[in-house]
Image: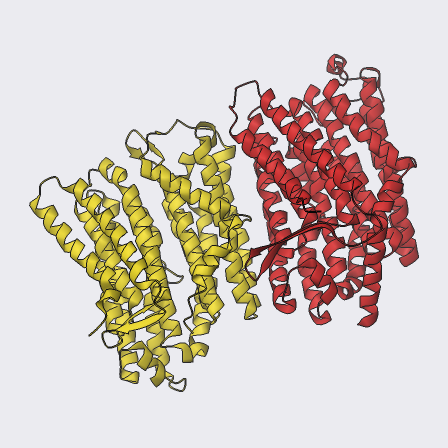
Chain colours: A yellow, B red
Amino acid sequence: MENLNLVLPEIFISLSIMFLLVLGVFKKNSSKITFNLSLFAILITAIITINETFSVSRETLFNESVVIDSMSSLMKIITLIGGFLVLVISSSYLKTFKIYNIEYPVLILSSILGMMVMISSNDLIVFYMGLELQSLALYVLATYNRDQLKSSEAGLKYFVLSALSSGLLLYGCSLVYGFSGSTNFDIISNQLNSNEYVLTFGIVFILVGLAFKISAVPFHMWAPDVYEGSPTTVTLFFTMVPKIAALTVFIRFLYVPFLNLIDQWQMIIIFLSITSMVFGAVAAIGQTNVKRLIAYSSIGHIGYTLAGLATGSNEGIQSSIIYISIYVVMNLALFSCLLMLRRNDHYYEDIEDLSGLSKNHPLLSLCLLVILFSLAGIPPLAGFFAKFYVFKAVLEQSMFFLAIVGLLSTVVAAFYYLRIIKIIYFDKEKDKYDTDHSLWLKFSLSVSTILILLYFIFPSQLIEVVSRINII
Amino acid sequence: MNFPILSSLILLPTVGALFLFFTKDKEGNNSTAKYVALFTTIVNFLISIYLWISFDQSTSNFQFVEDRTWIEGFINYKVGVDGISILFIILTTFITPLCIISVNNSVKNRLRDFLIAILIMESFMIGVFCALDLVVFYLFFEAGLIPMFLIIGIWGGPKRVYSAFKFFLYTLLGSVLMLVAIISIYWIAGTTDVIQLYELGIDSKYQNLLWLAFFSSFAVKTPMWPVHTWLPDAHVEAPTAGSVLLAAILLKMAGYGFIRFSLGLFPVASEVFTPLIYTLSVIAIIFTSFIALMQEDMKKLIAYSSVAHMGFVTLGIFTLQQQGIEGSIIQMISHGLVSAALFLCVGVVYDRMHSRMIHSYGGIVSIIPKYSILFMLFTLAALGLPGTSGFIGEFLILMGAFKDNFLVAVIASLGVILGAAYMLWLYKRVVFGKLVNEDLKKMFDLNRSEYLILSCLAVPTLFFGFYPDPLINTIEVSVTDLINMHNTNIASK
């Protein structure tokens, strides 16, 4: 008999989705209660995850198609926290647009469920199932503000391109299955040996599909449009949560089934990493919309995360995970600021709207200052340490070219972050924005900013948690 | 010594800044904020004086060392001072209160924010000079960019945005390569602790590349020709207090870095690249002196003179002679005092006339005599007149240079003449001559705070000019040991 306790979080969250759906359909005006209950459900899931799986070093279930190890439990917890925070700061935004409906939390929960399945997957089919579940939920979320043209466009674009990438991914999976005779990662790993070059095709297809999901260059085209068009809270969700799951799967694919073929995929990852870092930095310079800018900056940040993966070492993986965790916090803080730019029920998202913010909103500007310098990777803020660990791992493998290109692109990236700071601090002020923000929004902004600011005092804790992850 | 005196030096200004952050910001009247800031920095100065008094001059070992685990098994938070760094710490704590007194006249809006930026800046600057771990050093070194960027950008002149960006990006570009080098050192030697690295030494086959990476950062910060172009822009646009901090302390971080890291960690490479440094230094001395001659803007002129003076400093450091290095350190301290004073002098007339152009002045000696006397003192100190601290530094540097390379020393000596030319010409055009501009008659002489600041700077300039022993005694043993260590390293490889 399988130890179902290990998948209790997934079971619980599926049950809650069904319950909430039924509740929402049968009870009138149940938006508020659905929101609160789903928050509660995420919280409980997180607690179960910590209780049941955090101490497990490695267990497999269901014919070894699901794996519970320290990486999966850590990433699930980050996913759940991310989902919780997105949901909690969404409400006032959704109310403004009159889309405060029961579907929103249910969709978020289902995509989280999909991600959790992805994170734990140890089998091509389980992985694909999770991926599609989260993707389908995300398509709908992107179009969630359906009365707005841009939102519908974003959803459609995302759907078409994402479906294409899923197709490629599936084709890659079938090739790999054809050559190895199994869908299980561990068996594939044993079957594969580096002589079979046709297999490279399978790997490339899978990597292309995954690169699309994390929007690494050159498979990033959807990201700016989708990020700009989707409702801001959904964009926040896009930039944080699916990336965590996709990154985990990326790690799992590279380091479990394909570890023996490292010579063949390493160059691909280095290429993806360098192009993402450089393109993300250069393309963001000309942007005028904050959400588009964040899209390009997230492309750049994914490049740094991939740099850690390209190393082929445990330190590299750990540094990538540290990077993505810190990035999630910075992103949350940045979006909290963006959600505060509201005047008379209108949300502002152009960079120009930040002009002279420091005169009227000194505290908000200070937070933005900290966040932007952190995103630019200036010490002593958290963003610096994220980059520091990645480059430490990269240099350990003597990949000097990657490290130098990466660090030089941080200088280019610093330029556009500085441009925003310039607009906030050096330019003429505009009208005041509203200050009656929800408590949760203020909470998430202040907590994440303080984490960014004071990370340097306790840098060891995060490393300690992450250092339990040993995939290789 | 159990009390963490260095950490408290680093932290105190930040605590003061935090305190300021929570004070009420009243429009028009910010005297409370100013007194808080002033009090913090003066206490800091007193602590640093206490540090100097209790400093043991007879040893080159690092003193007041604090060593705490920071990132488990990787980086230790390690600070300490030796004879070289202690002087820079005192310079920092001495200049900062003067900057804060000077803001009265130059900074009109958001005074409280300005003071917070200056205080945080002070923390970072002190941190740079005490750090004994490469990563900790890098952290402080880079973090200083943030407050300086804001100081130039928010309170600067009309072209402030351009200058702030240029300052930030130039310095960042230089520094990222240093970060690569620091991490590489960790993989090569297994530690980033400077004291351990001094003992272990770094494999000479890596030294050249690492040296170049550090050089790229320090050369921008020094600034050396041809990457000096950010400095005149930054100086011209920064508010007076910002210029003072920039000239007096920020530039010294690089000179300090050259001594502590380039010489100390990479002795073989330092030997190899000495011709490069000599060439760049000599070009900086001669070329920027000529540029300084042509300047119409007083701040720009002084900025170019800083580049020339820092050229002497880098020249002196890489003579690898006792006199050369001691001269460089004294030159840096002296330049810290003198350039700060000169920028403040420009600030004084700028606050009254709102012009930095040389041609809008002339003949002010009879209108503001006190100012003219002090300005003259600092002009003479800048050109290295015997009896001022500038002389001691330049003299020792040239002495070291003559020992090492005759040709370079001769050319550099020509720079002294050029220095005298542009400084005296500046003084002549601003202070003497015919009084053409009628508006100048309305100028009033130094007020109390300006008088106080300039005299505070004049006293050590003269004192160390006549009696440099306190400075030389402090650095002597450390420099001797540095050179001995260098020579044994060269001999063994």
Counting every numbered tag in the picture gives 0
User: Which quadrant of the structure image shows residue B28?
Assistant: top right
Check the image and report above or below for A193 versus B294: below
Of residues A103 and B464, the one drawn nearer to the viewer in this rendering: B464
Q: Position of residue A247 (x, y in %)?
A: 37, 63
Residue A231 point in image, percent of width and height: 28, 45
The quarter of the picture where the C terminus of chain A appears is bottom left
Q: Name the image quarter holding residue A339.
A: top left
Q: Residue furthest left?
A: A26
The answer to whether any part of residue A345 appears in the image is yes
- Return the x and y of residue A188 as percentages of the image width and height: 32, 81
Which residue is pictured at 69% across the width and 58% down the height? B194
Q: Furthest residue to the bottom?
A: A195
Percent of width and height locating residue B85: 75, 47
* Direction from residue A254 to residue B209 in the image, left or right: right
Question: In the rendered image, is residue A349 in sight?
Answer: no
Q: Seen from this angle, which residue lies furthest front?
A: B2
Taking depth in this image into account, of A286 and B482 the one nearest to the observer is B482
Picture quadrant of residue A361: top left
Q: Quadrant of the N terminus of chain A?
A: bottom left
Q: Quick check: B373 left or right of B348?
A: right
B479 in relation to A88, above or below: below
